[in-house]
Image: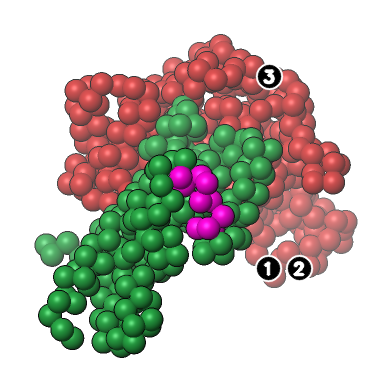
Chain colours: A red, B green
């Protein structure tokens, strides 16, 4: 999705943030976070609530200040900026929110015009720009409506148009689809993807839903307890999740959840059939590997769960199988030789 | 009621309207900025100035603690310094305004505090200055609540204005006391009460109508 990636739009460099609680004891929100958000990418940060993802996102436009380390946006040190300098950076960084944060007292048109008014743009230049933005997000028919008269998806489109008003270089998305139903989520994600492609705009988003990353993120990072525990191109992280937190997020979206009747009986050591997670990545995703395992090695695999889907343009499969424990290693060797990834989850009797 | 009482009632009504209108206007001019400042100057807020906030809060509370009739008498030297006299309708406007400012300030403060913090965050993210946030976000978004608060303040001022007879402020309340009570003319008292009830009803209805007009927080039937 980001073939144009070159250089970093945002750099987090050994970033730390601690708050003082009311009684003075420090609370660590972020620790030693280093991450580069590639120019033109859609980068997603996933974490549970309280993991620090929201704090991290707010560092980018200076709504939060780091207590250690640096944040750079387009070469500018955000943490060191103050006053007018900080406001100039903020005009280069658009932001959309989970609860949209539209002004109830302003129409669609007037909400989109607000950042331009704030930037001191002359009225004669605001008018054509706002018309164009509203057209771009498909809301021309609703320009004189108030937010209370719009659906969630329409409100988020207003939020997106507003965030783009000052032609920012970076768009921050704070759980922008978390308050939307699945269908609306898809249309909003498609709009974000389209903006990313058309404008070459770097998008940094935070979410607690792996499906959002699967659908639009070219790069991702997993945050846990204020630390980045895993980061890389989304496809690679999905294919080879290294950290337990990543796997637990993944289990929900890749069809790799153990069925209840298996999970309850799973134990670490033999006896029983070996349960193996097989990950198909790239061109192998569509190869009939289990059929070849049966015909070439005579090993019958029992399929427990699985799915094949796309991450970006590439197919990605995840399958849970069980095989005779005595032949488990042989089966895994065969699959690995043919470019698949395997992982033993345990045994079931 | 004898016909020659009608002009007296009419004059008293105009005097009440005059005192209430001017003190409401001056009270808003003073109370609105004070209320905005009180709402935004606590520690960590837009105009963070916790000590000034505390000091102003004390002054506001002190003024609001003084019973209005005491305030009227206590500030007579100040009133004389401001309008040149301590008796009459114009003199009455001084204590009315002084009572209105802290009252309106607290109402405005509450209205501003009710504005969703997410809107402030969104405006900050756009690069807005604190003053821009106040002008373009906080006050417009708080307008329905401010309109209702000002309605309440005007109704209270109508009540207060009845007490300024103590300094020769005239108006309906004063007329009711002097004719209705002291000269035993219950029909004047009744007329004064009826006029005050109608006045308060009109102010309340007008205030609610304005508040509803500026309130866009709920969908409205557009008749399309």
Subunit that carries the residue with mark 2 = A
Nearest-to-viewer mark from 1 and 3: 3
Q: Are marks 2 and 1 in contact (CB under 8 Å)?
A: yes
- 10 Å crowding of disc 1: few (<14), some (14-19), many (20+): few
User: Could you say which disc has been placed on residue A260 in the image?
Assistant: 1
* Residues beneath discs 3 and 2 located on the same chain: yes
Can residue B104 be seen by looking at this rendering? no
Q: Which residue is mark 2?
A: A264
User: What x and y, as percent, mark residue B127?
Assistant: 46, 27
Q: Nearer the viewer, residue A194 or A174?
A: A174
Left or right of residue A263: residue A187: left
Identify the residue shown where x is 22% and y is 22%: A125
User: What x and y, as percent, mark residue B108?
Assistant: 46, 52
For mark 3, give the secondary structure: strand
Q: CA distance from mark 3 to mark 2?
A: 46 Å
Q: CA distance from mark 2 to mark 1?
A: 6 Å
For mark 1, give the secondary structure: helix
Where are the magenta residues, as a range?
B71-80
Left or right of residue A134: residue A46: right
- In which quadrant will I find the N terminus of chain A? top left
Q: Which residue is mark 3?
A: A70
């Amino acid at each position: 999705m980001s073939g144009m990636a070159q250089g970093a739009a945002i750099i987090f460099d050994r970033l730390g943030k601690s708050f003082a609680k009311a009684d003075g004891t420090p609370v660590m929100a972020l620790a030693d976070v280093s991450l580069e958000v590639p120019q033109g990418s859609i980068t997603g940060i996933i974490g549970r609530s309280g993991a620090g993802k929201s704090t991290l996102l707010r560092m980018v436009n200076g709504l939060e200040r780091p207590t250690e380390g640096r944040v750079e946006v387009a070469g500018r040190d955000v943490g060191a900026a103050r006053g007018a300098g900080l406001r100039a950076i903020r005009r280069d960084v658009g932001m959309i929110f989970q609860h949209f944060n539209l002004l109830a007292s302003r129409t669609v048109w007037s909400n989109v015009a607000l950042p331009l008014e704030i930037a001191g743009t002359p009225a004669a230049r605001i008018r054509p720009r706002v018309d164009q933005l509203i057209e771009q997000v498909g809301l021309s028919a609703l320009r004189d409506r108030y937010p209370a008269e719009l659906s969630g998806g329409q409100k988020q489109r207003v939020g997106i148009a507003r965030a783009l008003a000052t032609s920012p270089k970076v768009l921050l998305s704070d759980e922008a689809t978390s308050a939307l139903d699945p269908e609306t989520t898809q249309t909003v994600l498609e709009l974000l993807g389209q903006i990313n492609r058309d404008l070459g705009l770097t998008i940094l988003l935070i979410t607690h839903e792996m499906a959002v990353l699967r659908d639009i993120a070219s790069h991702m990072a997993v945050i846990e307890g204020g630390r980045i525990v895993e980061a890389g191109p989304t496809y690679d992280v999905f294919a080879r999740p290294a950290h337990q937190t990543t796997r637990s997020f993944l289990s929900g979206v890749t069809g790799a959840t153990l069925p209840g009747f298996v999970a309850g009986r799973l134990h670490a050591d033999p006896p029983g059939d070996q349960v193996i997670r097989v990950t198909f990545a790239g061109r192998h995703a569509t190869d009939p590997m289990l059929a070849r395992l049966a015909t070439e090695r005579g090993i019958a695999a029992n399929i427990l769960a699985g799915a094949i889907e796309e991450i970006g343009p590439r197919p990605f499969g995840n399958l849970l199988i069980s095989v005779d424990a005595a032949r488990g290693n042989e089966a895994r060797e065969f699959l690995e030789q043919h470019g698949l990834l395997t992982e033993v989850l345990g045994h079931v009797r | 009621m004898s016909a020659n009482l009608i002009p007296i009632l009419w004059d008293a009504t105009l005097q009440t309207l005059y005192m209430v209108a001017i003190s409401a206007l001056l009270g808003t001019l003073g109370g609105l900025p004070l209320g905005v400042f009180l709402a935004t100057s606590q520690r960590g807020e837009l105009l963070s100035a916790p000590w000034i906030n505390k000091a102003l809060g004390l002054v506001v509370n002190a003024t609001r603690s003084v019973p209005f009739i005491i305030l009227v008498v206590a500030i007579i030297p100040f009133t004389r310094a401001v309008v040149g006299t301590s008796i009459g309708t114009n003199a009455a406007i001084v204590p009315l305004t002084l009572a209105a400012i802290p009252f309106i300030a607290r109402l405005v403060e509450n209205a501003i505090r009710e504005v969703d913090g997410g809107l402030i965050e969104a405006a900050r993210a756009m690069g807005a200055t604190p003053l821009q946030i106040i002008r373009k976000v906080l006050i417009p978004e708080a307008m329905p609540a401010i309109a209702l608060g000002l309605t309440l303040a005007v109704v209270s001022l109508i009540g207060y204005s009845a007490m300024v007879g103590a300094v020769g402020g005239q108006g309906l309340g004063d007329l009711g006391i002097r004719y209705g009570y002291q000269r035993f003319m219950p029909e004047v008292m009744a007329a004064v009460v009826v006029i005050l009830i109608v006045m308060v009803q009109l102010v309340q209805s007008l205030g609610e109508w304005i508040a509803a007009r500026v309130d866009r927080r709920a969908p409205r039937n557009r008749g399309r």
